[in-house]
Image (cartoon, grey):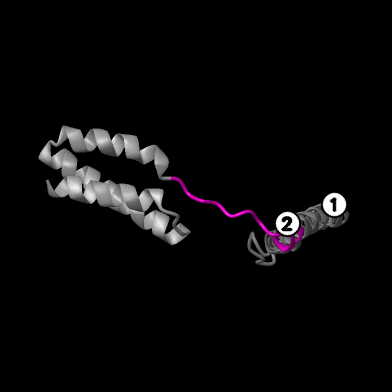
């Protein structure tokens, strides 16, 4: 009987308008109620919860114009950094010829000239994204 009372309270809360955080709390309540109903073997409550579950959806807000402009700016910046960085790495490819000379001098892998440039380029792309 207590499960039916909680179920009706949950149903009225789902049908009422709610914020994003409240929607997540409702989903947690639904999951706990379902677990309790499964443990108790209450088929009627489980059937009601199965009907109620599709009604529980996230209410997504539309992005503002500023958010859209920012998203496009980040995309363009990422593309520019990626493309220009690749071209710069191609220009520095002859540095790989120094690797056999630097290894006997004790320079470990990862600190060779082209390795350092590739790491810096990867960090720039990640910061632009």
Crowding at dot 2, Cα within 10 Å, few <14 / some 14-19 / many 20+, comes out as few
In the depicted structure, whether residue 41 falls above or below residue 57: above
The residue shown at (25%, 33%) is: 47
At numbered mark 1, what does the secondary structure look like: helix, strand or loop? helix
How far is disc 2 from disc 1 in space, using C-alphas?
33 Å
Q: Label 1, on which residue?
A: 90
The residue shown at (41%, 53%) is: 16
Stretch of the chain drawn in magenta: 57-69
Among numbered discs 2 and 1, the one appearing first in the sequence = 2
Report the side of 77 relative to 42 (left or right).
Answer: right
At numbered mark 2, what does the secondary structure look like: helix, strand or loop? helix
Residue nearest the viewer, comparing 9 with 45: 9
The residue shown at (17%, 39%) is: 38
Q: How many marks?
A: 2
Closer to the eye: label 2 or 1: 2
Q: Position of residue 123 (x, y in %)?
A: 68, 63
Q: Position of residue 91 (x, y in %)?
A: 88, 55
Residue nearest the viewer, comparing 22 with 115: 22
Residue nearest the viewer, comparing 126 with 16: 16
Q: Label 2, on which residue?
A: 68
């Amino acid at each position: 009987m207590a499960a039916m009372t909680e179920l009706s309270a949950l149903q009225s809360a789902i049908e009422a308008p709610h914020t994003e955080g409240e929607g997540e709390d409702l989903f947690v309540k639904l999951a706990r109620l379902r677990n309790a109903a499964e443990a108790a073997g209450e088929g009627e409550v489980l059937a009601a919860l199965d009907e109620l579950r599709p009604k529980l959806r996230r209410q997504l807000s539309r992005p503002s114009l500023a958010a859209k402009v920012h998203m496009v700016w980040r995309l363009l910046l990422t593309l520019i950094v990626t493309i220009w960085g690749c071209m710069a790495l191609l220009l520095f490819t002859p540095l790989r010829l120094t690797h056999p000379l630097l290894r006997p001098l004790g320079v470990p892998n990862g600190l060779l000239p082209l390795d350092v440039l590739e790491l810096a380029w990867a960090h720039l792309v990640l910061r632009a994204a």
